[in-house]
Amino acid sequence: MAVLVFVELSDGEVKKSSREAVTYASAMSNGDVVAVVLGTAAGDQLKKLGNNGASKVLHANNPKFDQGVISAYASALAEAMQKTQSDSLVLAESSLGNPVAARVSIKMDASLVTNVVALPDAHFNVKRSIYTGKASAHTTLTKDKKILSIKKGAVILKEDGAEAPIENFNPSIEDSDFGVKQVSREKTTGKVLLPEADIVVSGGRGLKGPENWGMIEDLAEVLGAATGCSKPVSDMDWRPHHEHVGQTGIKVAPTLYIAIGISGAIQHLAGVNQSKYIVVINKDADAPFFKAADYGVVGDAFEVVPKLTEAIKAIK
Amino acid sequence: MKILVCITHVPDTTSRIAFTNNNSEFDNSGVQFVIGPYDDYALARAVELKEQMGGSITVLNVGEAVTEPTLRKALAIGADDAIRINARADDSFFVASQIAEVAKTENYDLILMGRESIDFNGGMVHGMVGELLGIPSLSPVMKLEVENGVATLAREIEGGKEILEALLPLVVGCQEPIAEWKIPNMRGIMTARSKPLKVIEATTHSVATKTTSYDLPPEKGAIKMVDDMKELARLLKEEAKIL
Ligand SMILES: Cc1cc2nc3c(=O)[nH]c(=O)nc-3n(C[C@H](O)[C@H](O)[C@H](O)COP(=O)(O)OP(=O)(O)OC[C@H]3O[C@@H](n4cnc5c(N)ncnc54)[C@H](O)[C@@H]3O)c2cc1C
């Protein structure tokens, strides 16, 4: 039976996390993987979902879906599950994916587990991250239908060059699905999205003020990284809220997290403990962040960071 | 405005996380339990909305008797009455079903809660409640205003935010900076003791998942201290294989 994957678009582009979800689905199925795409997108990149493991793409090429309305997405995905008689749905966790999955789980009477970090076993028991990355739970999905929301890094992206055929999908959406109106939208463009990033450069209160973020951005640029910050930094409006990392902000799971002028409070660490490597730059040798780091630099950020940027440029 | 605020009773963010009984149960020993930080934002915004336009705030928790001090704290912060659904919060679906059961007959204008609990981080109860009641659910919401039955909200999206408009009733999963956390004052604490706290039994026991065991991540390896940035760049390239 087909495993369905909800493939999310960001400004018409397939998100990398969604391609990972396709690979995850192909690893848990016998190869019958149907990717569902809602909203306008160029056809050639949808075909390329075959590359990641999709055997077919269902595309609702309807601009009504471009705004990512939660109820409308939930209705369309439930309909796609019925249409394909699929009893499992996989998606990548995001600020849209999880709220949508919750509604689909009720519509379809399905078990839903979020923060999944590994493939399910034969009894549909999956490992998921809990306590904001400080522990994990092994949880069985007990209903016949199952929905899994996966975290970044749950599988290694497959790219085998295959292409998938695209089929038109016309979900019977109703006006009531669009009860919530989008008035406006603000989104940074041309920047790496923080939850998707493989490298994150993050700054804390040690940077003294928003005017000093230039060196953070320079370092992020040579690394192709996203920029993040600690909670007080976004509280003081030095940086926008969507850059706030930690317990009450974005939880990141990059290959490399560089923390500059951040003390390493337990609530900040909760958002970065899934990182593969952590570099800490802090002028205080006793800063608690060093206990969670792989590489540490004791020094003044204003001297050290530009030097690091130069050194990376030189060996890249 | 009739507001329901659903709160979790969770270990304080500084708690040491450990498990007992052959890794089948959370180890409560020495742990201090608090209102979930996201739920605390929801409650704070509810108090502000009530100050602006009057109405009532009911606070609800699905949990056993141990959660009552947490409910009393919410009463001290400004809720008018409390409901405890007497059952262990076994999974998100169970919790959402219990909340929807109460809300079905109460006609709340707004149902607020945190965008996720900080113990299981599920982030799905708001969506489930919305779907069970057949009303919109929005999360993670960082701004919420209400005027003439219309809510204006800012919802965080990756790399930014969207401004939305929706008619009440509505379920909202909250996060900062929707409001500032409120600390109960002396008067609040005194009056909380006599505010009504109703205990009701769960109507169903249906769950959608079953957790079989827990574990902790492996310990982090030793840190390498570096002085020279050329050396750090080399380590990142050769050891961590990043560049
Ligand atoms: C319920 C709750 C939830 C929270 N959630 C979060 C969260 O999600 N994310 C989060 O970040 N915080 C969160 N916090 C706040 C957290 O406890 C800390 O207060 C916060 O992380 C501190 O931010 P900071 O490290 O930037 O600032 P500080 O703690 O002030 O640290 C600044 C650091 O910069 C260093 N420094 C100063 N000057 C320099 C220099 N020139 N060069 C190099 N280093 C320098 C200092 O040595 C210090 O270590 C939460 C708190 C609570 C109670």
Image: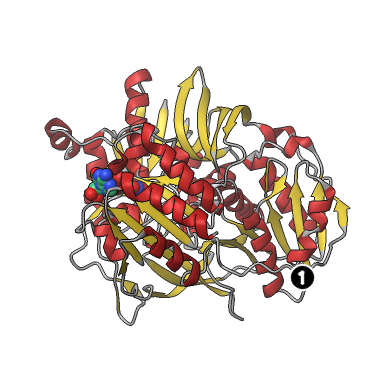
**SS at circle 1:** loop
Q: Quadrant of residue B33?
A: bottom left
Of residues B141 and A205, the one nearer the viewer is: A205
Location of the C terminus of chain A by quadrant is bottom right
Position of residue B173 in the picture relative to residue B197 (left or right): right
Say if B150 sits above or below B161 in the image: above
Q: Which residue is depicted at the point 86% across and 55% down? A: A166
Residue A107 % position (x, y): 65, 52
The residue wearing badge 1 is A160
Mark 1 is surrounded, within 10 Å at the Cα level, by few (under 14), some (14 to 19) or many (20 or more) other residues, namely few
Res B31 seen here: yes
Question: Relative to the observer, which residue lies in front, A95 or B84?
Answer: A95
- Tag 1: amino acid: Asp
The furthest residue to the front: A314
Residue at figure coordinates x 52%, y 36% from the top left: B155
Where A111 sits versus A310, above or below?
A: below
Residue B177 figure quarter? top left
Q: Quadrant of residue A146?
A: bottom right
Residue B205 or residue B21, whichever sits in front: B21
The answer to whether residue B58 is visible is no
Q: Residue at x 21, y 50 (%)?
A: B69
Q: Residue at x 77, y 71 (%)?
A: A1
Could you say where residue B22 lies in the image, as x and y percent from the top left?
33, 82
Give the answer, above or below, for where B20 lies relative to A172: below
Q: Position of residue B122 (x, y in %)?
A: 47, 56
Q: How many marks?
A: 1
Q: Numbered disc 1: what chain?
A: A
